[in-house]
Image (cartoon, helix red, strand yellow):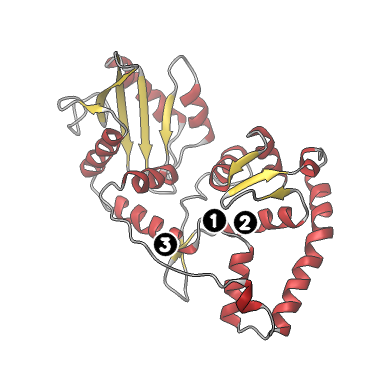
Amino acid sequence: MLPIINELKQLGGQSTSKELKRNVVADDKLIQENVLTSFKKSLSTGRKYLPFNFPFNFAITNLVMAGMLERPKKGTLKLTKKARDFHGTGKELSDQVYEISLPEWYTRSEKNKKEKIALHQIKEVNKSELDIDDGLEEDNWRSTILDALMQLSSAKFELFCRALVKKMNVDIDETIGTKLTGDGGLGGYGYITTDDFRTSRVAIQAKRWSLNNSVSSPEIDKFRGAMDKFRAEFGIFITTSTFTRDAVAASRAGTRVITLIDGDKLLDLIAKFELYVTPKVITTYELDDFFKEKN
């Protein structure tokens, strides 16, 4: 819970839960770097889910119960004055939070028992109480797209990444970075125009790597060398995997910062631009208090 509080302070006191989650993973060295793309398959439903969502959202819910966080709107978290004034250790925070939240969890559990809610319904209630913003449905489609990306050949993945960068307003060069060999280690190259007149060169690197094989800092250094060869002012490094913390630091060193797009961000961009995917709208309903109150 302490990394959540500390990250929100760094983010100005308010953030989306998705941004907060990414920052916690990026900055907390006790958390594995690939937890946001490490999907597992449910034995009961066969659907994919992200295990890290459960402890993260459980911590969020406890902090909300304890008055450390509030939700001004769905998907957004905000520090309260109580949290802003907290400067203790992780244990002190846990003790302070659980003193308030554990009785609340017990009260909810007893209420469920009294209302004789079926086991499968209790699971649904617990899921909503944890306020999992990503949702199990989202976990499932994200995993499906990631699996599909991993099945692409290296050449086709580079083609996919060039199409994505093109959606990001980069004019792709049809000669540089379009071959698997002989292009100086590039997966693509292009030009972006800003301020109506300034055009900059953009180098693209694409690595379709397994989730257990994170991109390290030597790969960043190698890409920067390719940028130098083609005099690129900007670099975009895309992977299905993750970047080590040393790689992130290397990407920010020097005069030219390299934009890193890991598997988690890649899935967001695919959904945003609807790149080779078709959105499906699933209608669902939540019961109002009218149905829950006793007659």
Residue visible at 66% across and 33% down in the picture: 10
Residue 145, image x and y in percent?
34, 54
Residue 47, image x and y in percent?
42, 68
Residue at the far left in the pictured view: 175
Location of mark 3 (residue): 140
Upstream in the sequence, badge 1 or badge 2?
Answer: 2
Upstream in the sequence, badge 3 or badge 2?
Answer: 2
Question: Crowding near pointer 2: few (<14 within 10 Å), some, many (20+)?
Answer: many
Q: How many marks?
A: 3
Location of mark 1 (residue): 133
Q: CB of mark 1 within 8 Å of CB of mark 2? A: yes
- State the separation of the CA atoms marked 1 and 2: 8 Å
For residue 57, the mark is 2
- Left or right: residue 292 versus residue 283 is right
Tell me the element at label 1: loop
For residue 20, the mark is none
- Left or right: residue 76 versus residue 271 is right
Q: Amino acid at mark 3?
A: Asn
Tell me the element at label 3: helix
Tell me the element at label 2: helix
Residue 164 vs residue 24, the one in the foreground: 164
Residue visible at 18% across and 31% down in the picture: 178
Q: Amino acid at mark 1?
A: Asp
Q: Amino acid at mark 2?
A: Asn
Residue 191 vs residue 272, the one in the foreground: 272
Residue visible at 49% across and 23% down in the picture: 252
- State the separation of the CA atoms marked 3 and 1: 13 Å
